[in-house]
């Protein structure tokens, strides 16, 4: 089951792609894409978009908690561009708890 934060991030990604008129979309995208290459395990990409005009794939890994970030689930980097999306509160709490000497 998805956390509410994940659903919010996905809706923001959809809004960015489709705007108010889906027929004028810059790119097309969807959630939870399964990718498998020969002789490799299946991996799940949280969100993937495709720009047909430029032939560019973008993959987004969404992490909303430290447990999610540290999970054994693969972080899939198969796009021409790859992004790690974190909640601001999660990112800031992580950096604040890191000693300055690191």
Image: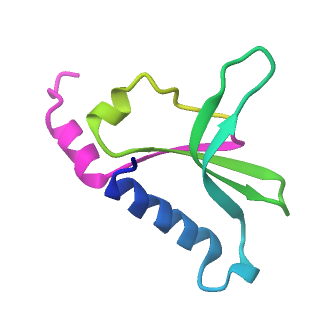
Measured as percent of width and height from the top left, residue 84 is found at 48, 43
Judge whether residue 87 is colored magenta. yes
The single residue placed furthest to the top in the displayed view is 39
> Does residue 17 sit above or below 21 in this rendering?
above
Front residue (pair 64, 31): 31
* Colour convention of the picture: rainbow
How many numbered badges does the structure rendering display? 0
Judge whether residue 10 is colored magenta. no
Front residue (pair 101, 54): 54
Left/right of residue 77 with respect to residue 7 in the rendered view? right
Q: Residue at coordinates 72% horizontally, 71% vertically from top-left?
A: 26
The single residue placed furthest to the front in the displayed view is 1
Measured as percent of width and height from the top left, residue 15 is found at 54, 73
Tell me which corner region of the image, top left, top right, bottom left or bottom right, holds residue 70.
top left
Left/right of residue 8 with respect to residue 81 in the rendered view? left
Measured as percent of width and height from the top left, residue 16 is found at 56, 70
> Does residue 36 sit above or below 83 in this rendering?
above
Tell me which corner region of the image, top left, top right, bottom left or bottom right, holds residue 7.
bottom left
The span shown in magenta is 79-102
Left/right of residue 11 with respect to residue 80 in the rendered view? left
Quadrant the C terminus occupies = top left
Q: Residue at coordinates 14% horizontally, 26% vertically from top-left?
A: 99
Measured as percent of width and height from the top left, residue 42 is found at 66, 26
Q: Residue at coordinates 18% horizontally, 30% vertically from top-left?
A: 98
Left/right of residue 59 with respect to residue 67 in the rendered view? right
> Does residue 99 sit above or below 79 in this rendering?
above
């Amino acid at each position: 089951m998805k956390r509410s934060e994940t659903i919010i991030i996905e809706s923001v990604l959809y809004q960015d792609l489709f705007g108010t008129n889906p027929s004028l979309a810059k790119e097309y995208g969807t959630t939870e894409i399964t990718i498998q290459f020969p002789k490799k395990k299946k991996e799940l990409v949280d969100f993937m978009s495709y720009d047909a005009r430029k032939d560019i794939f973008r993959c987004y890994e969404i992490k909303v908690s430290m447990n999610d970030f540290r999970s054994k689930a693969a972080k899939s980097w198969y796009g021409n561009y790859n992004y790690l999306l974190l909640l601001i509160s999660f990112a800031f709490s992580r950096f604040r708890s890191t000693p300055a000497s690191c």
